Amino acid sequence: QVQLVESGGGSVQSGGSLRLSCEISGTTYPSYCIGWFRQAPGKEREGIASIDSVRYTSYADSVRGRFTISHHSSENTVFLQMNDLKPEDTAMYYCAATYRGGTNWPTRRAVDFDYWGQGTQVTVSS
């Protein structure tokens, strides 16, 4: 059973940084895509970053240049380093995983992912 557990959320001021972690267990599939998503109240879930098993990455325009996704395979953990945070980054952040394979990897479409964590809250104050 694949499980994902996020951590690292919190409250910061505008311009601050946070690093989110997504610890993955229950899988040894060599081919994967891991994504970070966020959802603010009243808004749709947004795929903001993803990384696949050959370390290709994809970012949403809203976070490109400020956020960095990385995968430490020895720890089976995916990180999201978030710098220069803005109030509009306030949301619940989720990590997700898929092992189906696909020509559109790394994908940021929620429908492509099968396993989801419970989320961690990020709040940025101005």
Image (cartoon, rainbow, N blue to C red):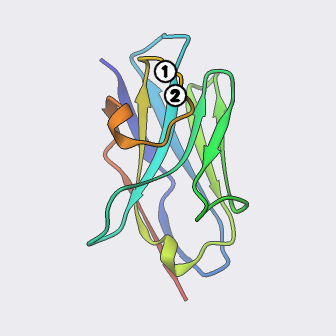
Q: Which residue is denoted by mark 2 in the rendering? A: 33
Percent across and percent down for residue 58 are 62, 43
- Check the image and name the residue furthest to the front: 103
What's the residue at 35%, 28% (across, down)? 3
| Between 108 and 28, the one nearer to me in the picture | 108
Percent across and percent down for residue 84 are 68, 72
Residue 33 in the image: above or below residue 14: above
- Check the image and name the residue furthest to the bottom: 126
Q: Secondary structure at mark 2?
A: strand
Q: Which residue is denoted by mark 1 in the rendering? A: 102
Q: Quadrant of the N terminus?
A: top left
| Between 116 and 104, the one nearer to me in the picture | 104
What's the residue at 69%, 62% (across, down)? 66
Percent across and percent down for residue 6 are 43, 45
- Check the image and name the residue furthest to the right: 65
**Quarter residue 99 falls in:** top left
**Left or right of 50 on screen, residue 83:** right
| Between 56 and 25, the one nearer to me in the picture | 56
Bin the neighbour count of mark 2 within 10 Å (Cα to Cα): few under 14, some 14-19, many 20 and up: many
Three-letter amino acid code at disc 2? Cys
Q: Secondary structure at mark 1?
A: loop
Of callouts 2 and 1, which one flags the residue occurring earlier in the amino acid sequence? Answer: 2
Label 2 vs label 1: CA separation?
Answer: 9 Å
Bin the neighbour count of mark 1 within 10 Å (Cα to Cα): few under 14, some 14-19, many 20 and up: few
What's the residue at 54%, 44% (across, down)? 21
Q: Are marks 2 and 1 in contact (CB under 8 Å)?
A: yes
